[in-house]
Amino acid sequence: MTEPLDVSDAQPVLPRARFAYDAHTWKEIAYLLTSFPLAVLGFVYAVTALSLGAGLTVTVIGLPLIAVALMGARLLGRLERGRARALLGVRIDEPSPLPVRRGDGFFGRLWNALKDPVGWRAMLYAVMRLPWGILTFVVTLVGLFVLWPVLPFVVRGLSNADRAMARALLSPSDELERRIEELESDRGVVVDTAAADLRRIERDLHDGAQARLVNLAMGLGLAKEKLLEGQADDTVAAMVDEAHGEVKLALQELRDLARGIHPAVLTDRGLDAALSSVASRCTVPVKVTADLPARPAEAIEGIAYFTVSELLQNVSKHSGARSASVEVWRSGDRLLIQVQDDGRGGASLDKGTGMAGLAERLGAVDGLFVVDSPEGGGTTVTAELPWRDRTAQRTP
């Protein structure tokens, strides 16, 4: 017979409690406790610098002082982003530096600094942090002695508010920063394209018209010598005839070169006539339709012309098409271009047909470039450019 179990001395079995004060919680506590002295420093800096600068705006040092203060606020913002990253685990991207353009001069750089949104948001953050920093410091400090069991939950709520404030005021403006980055990239594309165009013009002049004119000068020099010697025979006539032919070829090459820079027909008669002229030189029949109520700005008109010109060259060289079409029209604030052919298809931006360069050029002016070219199904290229009225341009 078994003895009855004596449970008088048995200890109750309690569930193991999870320790709430982990490393992450201690980091949040450290952030909230250190926020108060840093908030005091930031508030004093912001109020003193802005008050002093505003009070001295009647002098020559007032605005420069505010500009320097805003640049200092950027440094405070960088410090706060680093602290939030280390203690709160929130990663905030660094904003772009102040834009510095060649030729801005002192006043241009001063104006850029004064309108810096990153600096002004950092100033606002420094001012708002003081009352919030006092509140979080007091609550956290008292909680360490009074609210110990629930302090981790209180700390989590307070630090989440700090995360939201840091993201709102210390983060770069996504759209603005993205636009700055795009413009920097587009500026490089424009510079590279301009340099390539200059090299092409130099090469064409050196290898084409310049060489022909040198030969022409030599031929006319020899003919002149023979005429001075009284040798007005068939040899001189042949030399003059050859020189005449060289003149005509040189003139034609110069016309072609000028057309490649900016065709006269585009300047005089607009896109419709200029595109019809380009289409007439294509090796396949091309139908041109232009529905434009007015002429766009010269720069946009030139980009549209050269885009269609290069696309039709691709049709002639690579498509194997029997026919093609070009349509140009305005839709809202955009100029739309569509070039189609019934060729073999298979065109893309990475096959060395110059389309990648066209896409970059259009992208540099906020344009779009889309290629639809299935194998065996022909090619359709759609390009968009921003519409700018010709009358809105500045006249020199």
Image: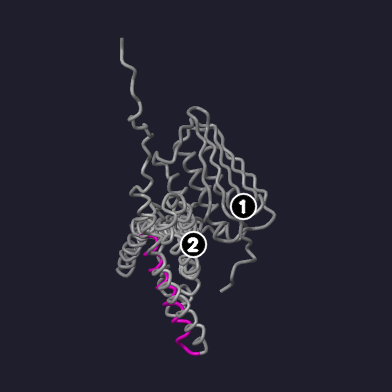
State the image quarter where residue 232 is shown.
bottom left
Provide residue 261's location: percent of width, then percent of height: 47, 58
Q: Quadrant of the N terminus?
A: top left
Identify which residue is drawn at 57% across, 57% down.
266
Q: Which residues are magenta?
A: 59-82
Task: Give the image location of residue 231, x and y in percent.
Answer: 32, 64
Name the amino acid type tagged 2: Leu
Between residues 54 and 150, which one lies in front from this camera angle?
Answer: 150
Q: Residues within 10 Å of mark 2 (few under 14, many from 20)?
A: many
Q: How is the image coloured?
A: one colour
Is residue 92 visible in this depiction of the protein? yes
> Residue 174 lies in magenta, yes or no?
no
Task: Say what amino acid the circle numbered 1 marks.
Answer: Arg
> 359 or 14, which is in the foreground?
14
| Residue 140 figure quarter | bottom left
Can residue 255 be seen in the rendering of this structure? no
Q: Which residue is mark 2?
A: 169
Q: Secondary structure at mark 2?
A: helix
Which residue is under mark 1? 334
| Residue 200 or residue 1, whichever sits in front | 1
- Tell me the chief SS of the magenta region: helix
Q: How many marks?
A: 2
